[in-house]
């Protein structure tokens, strides 16, 4: 049966471990609060120099988890655990996880490159990985697009950075390329004058650089005219659709024909005496 001295030893050890647990818990909860507060300071500092939400979000996440890792290690050290051994175990586990999740890490690396190089930002309309839409979120693993018909598309960052990225609205102006065919019998000068009149009457068409209308090709079924005005990027699609209708209506009024595809077929006598 343990004596009074043994009981006192147990009580002292219990109090010592209890104190360590209380201190470790205090370090963890207070440290977690400070980690959130400091990561918020990092975000506010970044937003003074950059309005990019993706950079701010990534910096906040990275700062929080780095600070929280330090807090956890400090709490474990207070409990008397060997930090050196723990770091060795974490390094080995990290290597194993890295090999198992190499595809996910590739997405993270691509996400970092997207955030740093900024080929697009949240709010841009882009075409990438075979999809088009407005960027709603740039994450570490994937990027999300909202399509014009209100669908959500999630694309892995490695798929994005491994192919071509087309940013539709990165510049304030865009050139509209319309190709309209007229019949060979029609007056080219008259067709060009009609198209130029439509462009002059539309306030969305920019004067610098000036719009152009010229013969682009003598095609199989007709003469192809290239109509190339410059407009503001936000006016591109409304102007494109309305221009097609305006050209068709004006050509009809002016007697300019938009030809159907035609093909001439000649039959030859095969020499079998029946032709």
Image (cartoon, rainbow, N blue to C red):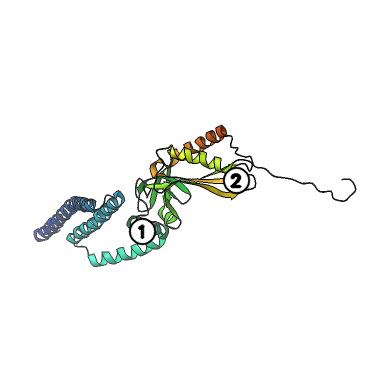
- Per the rendering, the mark at residue 137 is none
Quadrant for the C terminus, please. Answer: top right
Callout 2: 10 Å neighbours few (<14), some, many (20+)? many
The Cα–Cα distance between marks 1 and 2, rounded to whole angstroms, is 47 Å
Res 268 visible: yes
Where residue 77 appears, as percent x and y from the top left, is 19, 61
- Per the rendering, the mark at residue 223 is 2
> Tag 2 or tag 1, which sits nearer the N-term?
1
Residue at the image position 55 percent from the left and 45 percent from the top: 225
Q: Nearer the viewer, residue 11 or 136?
A: 136
Q: Mark 1 points at which residue?
A: 113
Residue at the image position 53 percent from the left and 33 percent from the top: 249
Res 125 visible: no
Quadrant for the N terminus, please. Answer: bottom left
Residue at the image position 24 percent from the left and 55 percent from the top: 63
Q: In which quarter of the image is residue 185?
A: top right
Q: What element carries label 1?
A: helix
Where residue 266 appears, as percent x and y from the top left, is 77, 46
Q: In this view, does 240 lie to the left or right of 46?
A: right
């Amino acid at each position: 049966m343990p004596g009074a001295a043994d009981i006192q030893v147990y009580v002292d050890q219990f109090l010592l471990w209890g104190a360590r647990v209380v201190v470790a818990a205090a370090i963890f909860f207070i440290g977690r609060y400070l980690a959130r507060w400091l990561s918020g300071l990092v975000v506010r500092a970044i937003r003074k120099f950059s309005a990019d939400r993706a950079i701010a979000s990534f910096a906040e996440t990275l700062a929080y988890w780095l600070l929280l890792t330090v807090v956890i290690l400090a709490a474990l050290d207070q409990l008397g655990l060997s930090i050196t051994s723990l770091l060795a175990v974490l390094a080995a586990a990290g290597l194993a996880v890295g090999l198992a999740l190499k595809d996910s890490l590739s997405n993270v690396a691509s996400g970092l490159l997207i955030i740093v190089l900024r080929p697009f930002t949240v709010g841009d309309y882009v075409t990438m990985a075979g999809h088009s839409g407005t960027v709603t979120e740039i994450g570490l693993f994937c990027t999300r697009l909202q399509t014009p018909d209100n669908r959500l598309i999630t694309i892995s960052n490695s798929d994005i950075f491994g192919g071509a990225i087309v940013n539709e609205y990165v510049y304030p102006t865009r050139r509209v390329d319309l190709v309209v065919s007229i019949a060979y019998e029609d007056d080219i000068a008259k067709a060009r004058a009609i198209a130029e009149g439509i462009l002059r009457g539309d306030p969305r068409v920019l004067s610098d650089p000036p719009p152009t209308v010229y013969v682009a090709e003598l095609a199989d079924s007709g003469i192809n005219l290239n109509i190339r005005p410059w407009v503001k990027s936000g006016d591109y699609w409304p102007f494109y659709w309305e221009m097609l209708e305006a050209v068709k209506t004006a050509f009809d009024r002016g007697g300019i024909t938009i030809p159907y595809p035609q093909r001439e077929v000649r039959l030859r006598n095969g020499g079998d005496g029946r032709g």
